[in-house]
Amino acid sequence: MFNDDIVLEQLKNVLVKIKLEFLNYEVQDDELFQQALDALALIGEKKIYELKEEVYQLVNFWEPIIRGEAVATLGYKNRLYLQGFRDEAYKIWKNDPDETVRGIALGAWTDLLRNTKNKHVIKELYSTLKNNNETGYVRLAALSGIFLVSNEPSDSYDTWIIGSKYIDSETPEEFNSLVDWEDVHKVIRKYAPEIMQH
């Protein structure tokens, strides 16, 4: 429980103000926009669960940077990590028009499924990773998610540390050339060997 009532009220006020801007479909105030991003980061960092409902209200915000930060705040392990957000993170991944928000939502969904070794999730992540029509950001989240959900070590890389080269790939072929497919296939053979036969 967060013990500073003044800070709690200040953060809540910022989120209420930015929500009102949501109704206008344009943020008139750059300072308010930055305050909202800072508030979301602080809520996650300090794990201020008292404001989770206010954060939930921003996952549909018109501006993708705010949406993405709200999704990360609710779903990432180093933030609020709300298990009840898992289904919503999945829906955002599948439906959001912004590729970065979709990648963040996929990252949150897999983070919330961390170490579950869920065969169906691993299969879906592998399918996303193999989808050359998907963006680099989303494919990177799928790649990372395979190792996160399976809890299998990766012999070759930490995808988030070197992730920018994946995201910046100009073609699906370039992205594919960066992936250590043998490392990925070790996990797939262990948890979903039937899909390796296709």
Image: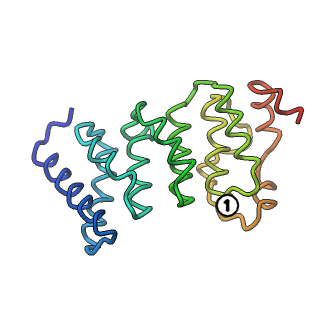
* Neighbourhood count class around disc 1 (C-alpha, 10 Å): few under 14, some 14–19, many 20 upward: some
Residue at horizontal 24%, vertical 55%? 15
Tally the numbered discs.
Answer: 1
Front in this rendered view, residue 20 or 117? 20
Residue 104, relative to residue 153: is it above or below? below
Callout 1 amino acid? Lys
Q: Residue 31 location, x and y as percent?
A: 25, 71
Residue 127, image quadrant:
top right
**Residue farthest to the left?**
6
Query: Quick check: 61 left or right of 16?
Result: right
In the image, residue 116 above or below residue 133: above
User: Would you name the residue on which mark 1 appears?
Assistant: 165
Q: Quadrant of residue 46?
A: top left
Along the horizontal axis of the image, is 141 left or right of 171?
A: left
- Residue 50: image x %, image y %? 22, 38
Residue 121, quarter of the rendered image = top right
Q: Position of residue 148 (x, y in %)?
A: 60, 34
Figure quadrant of the C terminus:
top right
Give me the residue at 76% from left, 55% from top. 132
* Disc 1, SS: helix
Is 108 displayed left or right of 69 in the figure?
right
Q: Observer-nearest residue: 192 or 187?
A: 192
